Image (cartoon, grey):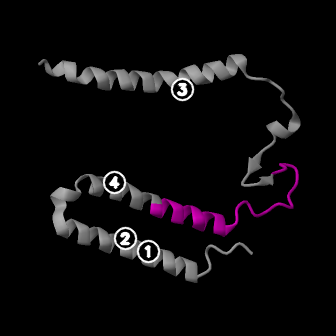
Amino acid sequence: MNASVNYIPLLMTMFFAMLVPFILITADYLMGPRRPDSNKKSAYECGFIIDEHDDSYSDRLYVRFIVVAMLFILFDIEAVFMFPWAVSFKVLGPEGLFAMFFFAAVLLAGLYYAAKKGVFEWD
């Protein structure tokens, strides 16, 4: 079989993956309602309405938002490393299993430490 024939499903998937967002954005633009007002045009950040003319709002973000976001990224990266491990689980054997247990244990120890420090308490 010709090698280029094997790439046709991949090319079709890539074509449709690029085409669908353009179709959806165009359909939203053509059929969506347009009711602009001052609230929709105002700046909005993490649940706080920001007034450009008011200087009393000095804190942009609470530190706990950033810490929780960093923890989310940490555990998201853990999931990214677990997918290839799960795919090659049989090839890796017991060494791969113990390595993943160690990896997960280190991350769970970090989660336990963050919980003991009170990172997840929203006072």
Tag 3, which secondary structure? helix
Query: Which residue position is annotated with label 2?
Result: 104
The answer to whether marks 3 and 2 mark residues whose Cβ atoms lie closer than 8 Å is: no
- Kindly identify which residue carries mark 3: 21
Image location of residue 76, percent across then percent down:
46, 58
User: Which residue is depicted at the point 61% across and 24% down?
Assistant: 25
**In the rendered view, would you say 116 is above or below 66?**
below
Q: CA distance from mark 1 to mark 3?
A: 38 Å
| Amino acid tagged 1 | Leu
Tell me: residue 93, above or below residue 43. Answer: below
Residue 116, position in %: x, y?
56, 83
Q: Secondary structure at mark 2?
A: helix
- Tell me if 123 is positioned left or right of 96 in this view: right
Element carrying mark 4: helix
Q: Residue 37 location, x and y as percent? A: 87, 33
Q: Which residue is mark 4?
A: 83
For marks 1 and 3, the one nearer the N-term is 3
Which of the 4 quarters of the picture holds residue 105?
bottom left
Instruction: Please check the rendered image and state whether residue 26 is part of the magenta-colored stretch, yes or no.
Output: no
Q: Position of residue 60 (x, y in %)?
A: 73, 60
Estimate how packed mark 2 is, as few (under 14), some (14 to 19) or many (20 or more) residues with alpha carbons within 10 Å: some
Place residue 109 in its image quadrant.
Answer: bottom left
Nearer to us of marks 3 and 4 is: 4
Residue type pointed to by label 4: Phe
Circle 1 is placed at which residue position?
108
Label 1: few (<14), some (14–19) or many (≥20) C-alpha neighbours in 10 Å: few
The quadrant of the image that shows the C terminus is bottom right
Element under disc 1: helix
- In the image, is 97 to the left or to the right of 52? left
Q: Residues within 10 Å of mark 4 (few under 14, many from 20)?
A: few
Callouts 2 and 1 close, C-beta under 8 Å: yes
**Gap in Å between the C-alphas at discs 1 and 4?**
18 Å
